[in-house]
Amino acid sequence: MHGIMERHVSNPANPLLKRTVVRFIDAAGEDIVFTHGQGCHVFDRKGRRFLDCVLGYGPVVLGHADERFNARIADALGKGIHFPGFADAHDEYVAKLVAVSGLKSPVAPSFMKTSSEANTAAIRIASLVTGRKGVLRCGFTGWHDSQHARSPSWHAPPGHRMPLRNTEGLRGVSGDEEVFNWISLDPEDLGALLDTHGHRIACFILDAFQFAFVERDVILGAIAQCRRHGIMVVLDETKTAGRVSPLGVAGHCEDAWDMLVLGKAIGNGAPISMLLVKEAFRDPALKAQVGGTHSKELLSVHCALATMDRMQEADGHRILGNAGSAMADLFNACVRQLGLSEALAMVPVFGGSLLDIRMRDDLYADPALLRKLQASFLARGVLLLVGHPFFISLAHDGAVDAWRETFLDALGDWWKAVSNDDMAKRSAGPVAIGNSLVAS
């Protein structure tokens, strides 16, 4: 749901492969190519400024070109970025992570570049431990085959998840390696699935963003159901670790996971992910031979250390929540002013460190309308996502209210487009937020 327009203009000489979800297209149908960022803004090669609420899809948590962060990384560069083996900085990061998070369980940490790698490693470890090859998924957990094939639109509320996609060219999702989806977040559906297939499933991989759609006890109950079938639990806190808290939304519930994945915001934009494996599974993790050449690279680790220190010094998790809540308040005030309260709302997720736009049920049925909403904001200089959570950085704190008129204009433009398509005559209803219905 992230594309802006159907017409694309590419560089005819060796154009980059760009999936629609990582492209922003302006009103002229041309790619927006970014050149630099500062604070909560990014700039393109035409000199246009954008309020950035995409933040690389979540990694940038301090803001662009944070001076103290840059100084730390410049110092680290003078000492080398890749040694023959692991370095003091790796041990320092793990020790600080344990200290600031209050982690009590002994773990075997492994450094990765992306959470797709970390989840793939977790699947291999779980298969070694259980002797099974099946995987149970709930949420988006990466782009590798067993994480991505035959998956719905995980970021939409359960009632609006599309039919299974990504059905061609992907392997390791059939036979003994079959992959199952828990789409509905209904415990009875999960129970029926486990009664039939539980004996074949090695691990349950849970995207922590799913906590945004149902009560916490529903997810914890699902984890308990899986454990009764001997299924290992992988909690993927990629979107939330370092942003909601050092371990994300539920990482501090140490009884709820066997392996924990951290990523995105922990490095403020640097490619780094962590796989924390409970100590009891250290030997299978070693046997699985997870990791690669760049697992011991240092630059991203220094970025993670600088990010953690900066977040602790600034009381960053609280600031993110405040900034996100302020943006949601602004958006919803504009919605009310325009009389659109029964059509959409911005929801501050996990205290405001993530944001999500929820729509009236019938609007979800037309993805073109969601694209038009995103395009309306883009045309007014605001980068955000519709149909996918979007993000806030420390640099957004105190900077949001200046965009009030922009939000009003963008929402007004969108509703005019809806009206022109004769969509304004749809039956009105309250906006779905999680399991509840919030009236205007």
Image: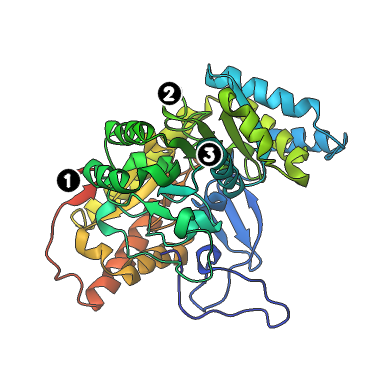
Q: Determine the image quadrant of residue 96.
A: top right
Left or right of 304: which side holds 172?
A: left
The foreground one among 293 and 436 is: 293
Of badges 2 and 3, the one in the foreground is: 3
Helix, strand or loop at label 2? It is helix
Left or right of 122: which side holds 336?
A: left
Vertical order, 270 against 257 (above or below): below
Location of the N terminus by quadrant is bottom left
The tag on residue 437 is 1
Q: Position of residue 97 (x, y in %)?
A: 61, 24
Amino acid tagged 2: Asp
The tag on residue 126 is 3
Task: Specify the color scheme.
Answer: rainbow
Of badges 2 and 1, the one in the foreground is: 2
Amino acid tagged 3: Ala
Q: Residues within 10 Å of mark 2 (few under 14, many from 20)?
A: few
